[in-house]
Image (cartoon, grey):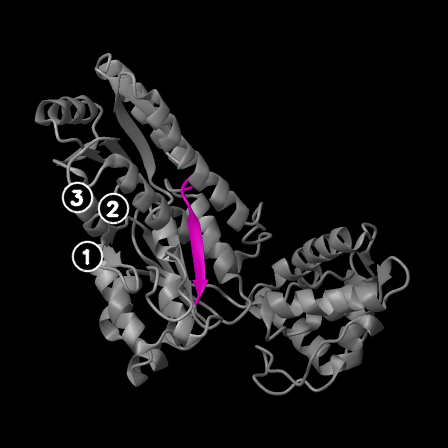
Amino acid sequence: MARILVADDEEGLRTFVAEALQHDGHTVVQAADGAEAARRLEAESFDLLITDLRMPRLDGMELLRRVRAEQPELEVIVLTAHGSVDTAVEAMKLGAYDYLEKPIGGPPELRLLASRALEHRALVAARDRAAREAPGLPPLTYGDPAMTPVVEALRKVARTGTSVLLLGESGTGKEVAARTLHAWSERADAPFVAVNCAAIPETLLESELFGHEKGAFTGASGMRRGRLELSDGGSFFLDEIGEMPAALQAKLLRVLEERRFERVGGTRTIAIDVRWIAATNRDIGVLRETGALREDLYHRLAVFPIRLPPLRERRQDILPLAETLLARIGATTGRSHLVLGGEAKRRILAAPWPGNVRELANALERAAILTDGDEIRADTLEIPGPAATPSTGGAAGTLEDIERAAIEEALAQSGGNRREAADRLGIGLRTLYEKLKRYRGEVAEEPER
């Protein structure tokens, strides 16, 4: 339900309005005049203001001007005496949602107008959210068993409001996991707001998180709501939390504990209700030992930690992922018929991809640019090396080293079953026998039909 401020110097009318709206479950705060209402607005956060136009000390028109300048997201309904409709129309030109003539017809009329104003506020917020969010989410996995516990964990924790810490190398899809967690939660229709702590300069990060008031610092020409305020009711994703400055970590800890904050340069306390999701690609133990991540903040955020495995640990996902990424690249470049050649598939499957999904996407985009036809060839794929492989732990300086390691890993994962290993690698059984002959010196057997 909403928080509503009612400002009127007539006590009886104030009480009538408050009781009518409280009947719908709203929290209603009363102010005896415009000056008291202005003080309340500076100190507290509201969804709707209902104000008389004629009040002592500060009239409703001036109060409306202040609200439009300082809290443009706040909806306003004005109350006007019979015969003063022109003044009410002027108030609507200044940004009031609507007006009611005194005497008010009854509680149903008041409740209906208030509900419409609050619905309008929600629609505006939804429009702003849609403009910020990218449509559609890529799948978390294409069926690799290594991702099964990740998906199960996300589904279970999505039903709660528990804080989640996502751990994993750069490019493993932590933001996709965070967005999926939000989409599976009861907050799916509310905002999902993300902040990358490593991508925003330290001098700007505080304002980005908390917002600022006009004149808070040089260049602050007007009030600006921060990402935290925009995420109210939804999920707030802090990517690369280990890169946040220590002073800001202390302020963030207070928000987690008290669920409220003030804009930079402001005194008005803003209450928020968000689901916290954080992520880091760094070693969490090192972050804690070195003090890069406060111990108390870590415990607040890591109530439910989830590790996302790198691509080299989920090889069944690699080729379907590569084909999905290539289709996306083709759609954005007007080349919808791009496909991976057979040798390109084998090379993609054999590579260790230390940069994970991001590195794979970059390699495919470059290959698409270099390819004249529709088929991506192996010689257009630039796969950086040397890189560590999971089977040897050493350097893979050539394509043969990478391929050999991938074959050995597939055989190990399939318990020596060569047909299953060939399926994992995305190659034919006969091809696998030929490669084993080449790398192990084995006699190429006739594969079973």
In the figure, 424 relative to 379: above or below?
A: above
Label 2: how many residues lie within 10 Å, few (<14), some (14-19) or many (20+)? some
Q: Which residue is mark 3?
A: 35
Q: Which tag, 1 or 3, sits closer to the chain's start?
A: 3
Give how far apart the Cα atoms at labels 1 and 3 are.
28 Å
Label 3: how many residues lie within 10 Å, few (<14), some (14-19) or many (20+)? some
Which numbered tag is attached to residue 45? 2
Amino acid under label 2? Ser
Q: Which residue is mark 1?
A: 258
Q: Residue placed farthest to the right in the image?
A: 373
In the image: residue 14, left or right of residue 205? left
Camera-side residue of 418 and 172: 172
Secondary element under disc 2, as helix, strand or loop, is loop
The quadrant of the image that shows the N terminus is top left
Which numbered tag is attached to residue 119? none
Percent position of residue 218, x then y: 39, 71
Q: Quadrant of residue 237?
A: bottom left
* Residue 375 in view: yes
Q: Nearer the viewer, mark 1 or mark 3?
A: 3
Residue at 87 percent of width and 57 percent of height: 374
Camera-side residue of 51 and 396: 51
Amino acid under label 1? Glu
Percent position of residue 407, x then y: 68, 72
Magenta residues span 188-196
Camera-side residue of 74 and 79: 79
Q: Residue placed farthest to the left in the image?
A: 11
Residue at 74 percent of width and 65 percent of height: 365
